[in-house]
Image (cartoon, grey):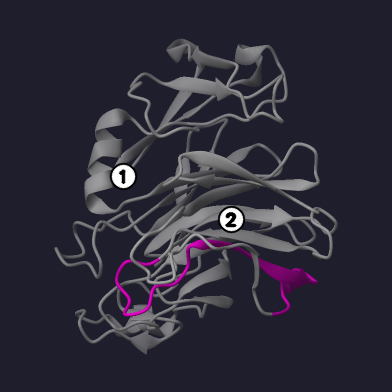
Amino acid sequence: MGGGSTRTEPVISALRGSLNEGVLDASLPMNEKEHSTVLLPGGMVHSAKMSDVGGDALDLFWPVRADYAERAAKQSALYEQVLAPDAKHLYVAVGSSSNIADNGMEVEEGRAAIYELDLASGASRIFAGGLRNAVGMAWEPTTGVLWTVVNERDGLGDETPPDYLTSVRDGGFYGWPYCYWGQTVDDRVPQDTAMVAKAITPDYALGGHTASLGLCWVPAGTLPGFPDGMAIGQHGSWNRSTLSGYKLVFVPFENGRPSGPARDILSGFLAPDEKESYGRPVGVVVGPDGRSLLMADDVGDVIWRVTGA
């Protein structure tokens, strides 16, 4: 969970025994002969067997190979993963390598997409595309629909286009790089009218350049006064005239859909003069007690625990 590891071999990280303190009790090397390896454009994901760590109910992390991770850091390509509720499929988000396919679409082949991986067979397919940088993913439990937060393109102003929260349709195309927020054409990009025509409008705008990264489903009652909804860690902008993000926000849901304006859960990370940030939210999960949120902060290098008063 920290940012300083230089480990390169595949490892299962198991959090157990001291969950309230977030202590990493074990890092267990994988047995390569007992694991299937699934290759993606630009990355590698290992599917692990629960029996390899004693059959306990553990959180498993599939790390990207070191050389791919270095490439991803240089190209803004993100590799986020979420396990399906049936534990038979893994969904992996692979970001674009540039802002608007600056080096041509051949370089972007297989990117800006969410992949579905069959953990039994190792087969993979693109589940949805046209998502510039889909980052956090989470399941809405009443509908069983996958949702994600997406970091949109730069260079069109403070608010255009907004980063967004959206449901992810099987086979859906969300516009990148040809258009944004539905079928608004980006005239900086050589166009494909057929792709523009099938672009889906996202569900919920989060504002321009918020760098929304973390996403988790929050059941009603997790925090006092909060209904069902999604918590979103907003890392914060760097390229706006007035900065945005730098907080943990909550989007309420009803009947499987967003139902109102976002509310701040945790804020105050940005100095009033915007010259210093005291923290930058990243990932967020519901705590093991079911009555708290745990949020990673990669400026403070800490995990914040948010509870009711």
Residue 161 location, x and y as percent?
Answer: 39, 80
Quadrant hosting residue 48: top right
In this view of the protein, which residue sits in the foreground, 114 or 26? Answer: 26
Residue found at x 67% / y 26%: 58
Q: Is residue 190 visible?
A: yes
In this view of the protein, which residue sits in the foreground, 188 or 268? Answer: 268
Q: Label 2: how many residues lie within 10 Å, few (<14), some (14-19) or many (20+)?
A: many
User: In the drawing, what numbered circle is on residue 95?
Assistant: none
Element type at mark 1: loop
Which amino acid type corresponds to the residue marked 1 in the rendered image?
Pro
| Membership of 248 in magenta stretch | yes
Which residue lies under the disc numbered 2?
215
Element type at mark 2: strand
Q: Quadrant of the C terminus?
A: bottom right
Above or below, 278 relative to 261: above
| 201 lies left or right of 152 | right
| 123 lies left or right of 184 | right
| Membership of 141 in magenta stretch | no
Which residue lies under the disc numbered 1?
41
Q: How many numbered tags mark residues here?
A: 2
